[in-house]
Amino acid sequence: MVLTPFSALLESRRHLGNTVFYDLPEDWLQGRTAFGGVSAALAVQAMRDVAGADRPLRGLQTSFIGPVPAGELRVEVRVVREGRAMRQVEAALKVGEDTACLLLGSFGLARESVIPAFAPAQPAAPAVDACRPMRYIEGISPAFTQHVEFRWAAGDQPFSGGNARDMQVHMRLRDEAIDHELLCVLLGDAAPPVAFGHFERPTMGSSVTWALELLPCAPAPSPDAWWRHDTEMHAFSAGYSHERAALWTPRGELAAFGYQIVAVFG
């Protein structure tokens, strides 16, 4: 399979009024649907194209409604409200006439405050060179993982029959440099759910909702620098895994918080 870089997806997009069109190749799929992080990143780019890119993304709420197969998809954008600092933008990712994904992006200018800036420190983890890689296995691994390199620092790899409730994974996008904000969205959803490590064989699962909150931080020093994604299975009940995550830059800065609900079919 010839891989299509994320930057090539962006370069080939087309505009018609408040709608942005993309052609999604099969190498960005996760099973029969697009990898959630790429759907969200494409939608964020569409929001910036239509509503403006002058305000940083502060928060993204995403509902995964239906499958996003390879082929043409469109993102219909609407500015819900705009104030002096905050802009709220809605995006509907459409496949044919069906809405496959709904997103609300909150873009906000920096505000002055008497409260000093702070963020938690990055917890210790084994260095990248000491960690085992996750191999790509044709027919089992999601196609999009060919674009991302993973090194397991702690926790169970998918379908290894473990019982860990926490996971630490070093990761980086292969062979290309992309916009820092879009990279945070892309990598913020790249790690597999912790729940998958509890199964002994490949098992179906699907994200239902995903929330991502971004913090100001410096871009990576180079495209091949390693980021880290820490995930905790906060609760599990009735076939749904409730997981929260932190994405750390190669410099150890907190780039984003994430929270998702994952339906697992096993």
Image (cartoon, helix red, strand yellow):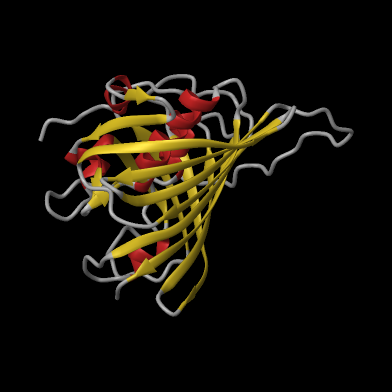
The image quadrant of residue 204 is bottom left
Residue 131 visible somewhere in the drawing: no
In the image, what residue occupies the spot 46% across and 38% down? 185
Which is nearer the eye, 5 or 126? 5
Q: Is residue 110 above or below residue 254?
A: above
The x and y percentages for residue 23 are 23, 32
Residue situated furthest bottom in the rendering: 238
Residue 258 visible somewhere in the drawing: yes
Describe residue 108's horizontal placement relative to residue 243 as left or right. right
Q: Is residue 262 above or below residue 111?
A: below
Which is nearer the eye, 124 or 105? 105
In the image, what residue occupies the spot 75% across and 38% down? 118
The image quadrant of residue 53 is top right
Residue situated furthest right in the rendering: 114
The x and y percentages for residue 57 are 58, 33
The x and y percentages for residue 194 are 41, 61
In the image, what residue occupies the spot 39% across and 59% down? 207
Q: Is residue 257 above or below residue 243?
A: above
For the image, the number of numbered tags is 0
Quadrant in which the N terminus is drawn: top left
Q: Is residue 205 above or below residue 252?
A: below
The x and y percentages for residue 93 are 37, 43
Which is nearer the eye, 3 or 225? 3
Quadrant in which the C terminus is drawn: bottom left
Which is nearer the eye, 194 or 184? 184
